[in-house]
Amino acid sequence: MLQIILTLAIFLILVIPMGKYMYHIATEQKTFADKVFNPIDHLIYKICGIKNEDMGWKKYALTLVTANAVMVFVGYLILRIQNLLFLNPNGIEGMESSLSFNTIISFMTNTNLQHYSGESGLSYAAQMCVIIFMMFTSAASGYAACMAFCRGLSGRKLGNFYRDMVRITTRILIPVSFIVGLILVSQGTPQTLMQNFTVETIEGKYQDFAMGPVAALESIKHLGTNGGGFFGANSTTPFENPTVISNIVELLSMMILPGACIVTFGHMLHDRKKNKVKAAAVAVAPAKKNPYGTSGRCSVWRNGSHLYDRTSVMLQLRDGRKSRDR
C-alpha cells in the first residue's frame, strides 16, 4: 500500500512539469534544454534533408506509414540474418520467417506481442538494432501522431512528422531513458555485451545466467509503454526488476508520458481560448469612432495579419490620441 501511495505521489509531482515541457516541444517554443538539443536537431535535419514546413493530414499520415514501413523491412531483414551479424556471442540462429514478421509488425505498431524468449531467441545486435530501436521509433511515431491530433483539435496546423519524431526522440525519449537506465543499473540490472555464463550452485548443480544490454531495453520499454522484455518472463525476473526502487521507477516510466499528454493537450486548449479572446478584443476595438474615417475599422485584419501594431491601436482608442494610419 505504501508503495502505491508513494508511486502516485511522485507521479503527480512529475506529470505537470513534464506535460508543460512536452507542450513547449510540440509547439516549438523555447525550453531550458534548447542550447543542448537545438544543434543536435539541426544536424539531423540537415543530414536527413528535413524541411521546416507544415504537412496536411494526408501527407502527415502517409509519411508516418511510409517511414515505419521502411523500418519494418530493415528490422525484418536483421531478424532473419542475425546469425550472420555482429554481437552474437551466444551463437543464436536467425529467426523463422513468420515469427520475424509477427515480431517486427508487433513492435512497429507498439503492441509488442512477444512469441519468443529474448535471452534464447535474439542476438544482442537484434535486441539493440531491432527491438530497442523499434521501441524508440514506435513510441516516437505514436507521440508524434498524438501531438498532431492535439494541435489539430486546438486549431493549430498539424506540423511536420519528421520534425516531431526527431524532437520527441532527442528531447524526451533518449534523455529520460538514459536516466532510467542508470537507475536500473544502480539497482543491479545488467548492462553488458558479455556472453551468457554458467555457475555451479551450492547444491552442486549448474545454472545458466543470461546477460546482455538489459537496462537499455528496460528503460525505453517502460517509458515508451512498450511490451516485450529482454527475458521471456519480462519484469517478473530479478535481472529486469531487481528491487523495490527499480519497480517504482518502472511504474513511473510507464505512467509519466501518457499522463503528460493530457496536460499538454490542456495547455494547447488554454492557449486557443486566450488567442480567441485577444482576437475578439482587437477585432471589436476598432469599431469605435475613428476621427480619421472608417478605413482603420475595415483594414485592421487582412489575410489574417495586422496592418496596425496592436499596442498602438489599443492606446489610440484608450487615450483618444490622433495619429496617422500605418
Image: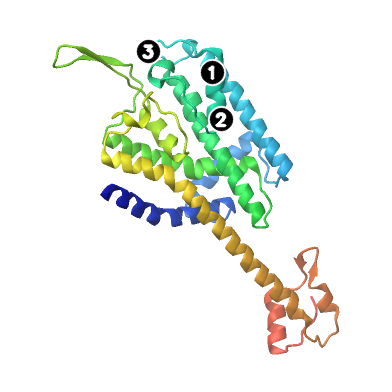
| Image position, residue 156 (x, y; %) | 67, 55
Q: In which quadrant is the C terminus drawn?
A: bottom right
Residue at 38%, 13% (x, y): give it.
89
Q: Circle 3 sits on which residue?
A: 90
Q: Circle 2 sits on which residue?
A: 108
How is the model colour-coded? Answer: rainbow
| Residue 204 appears left or right of 9 | left
- Marks 1/3 in contact by CB < 8 Å: the verdict is no
Q: CA distance from mark 1 to mark 2?
A: 12 Å
Mark found first going from the N terminus, 1 or 2: 1
Residue at 67%, 49% (x, y): give it.
158
Instruction: Say which of 302 and 141 sits in front.
Output: 141
Specify the amino acid type for callout 2: Met
Specify the amino acid type for callout 3: Asn
**Quarter of the figure with residue 175:** top left
Mark found first going from the N terminus, 3 or 2: 3
Element at label 3: loop
How crowded pointer 1 is (Cα within 10 Å; few <14, some 14-19, many 20+) is rated as many
Q: Nearer the viewer, mark 1 or mark 3?
A: 1
Q: Circle 1 sits on which residue?
A: 100
| Image position, residue 92 (x, y; %) | 42, 12
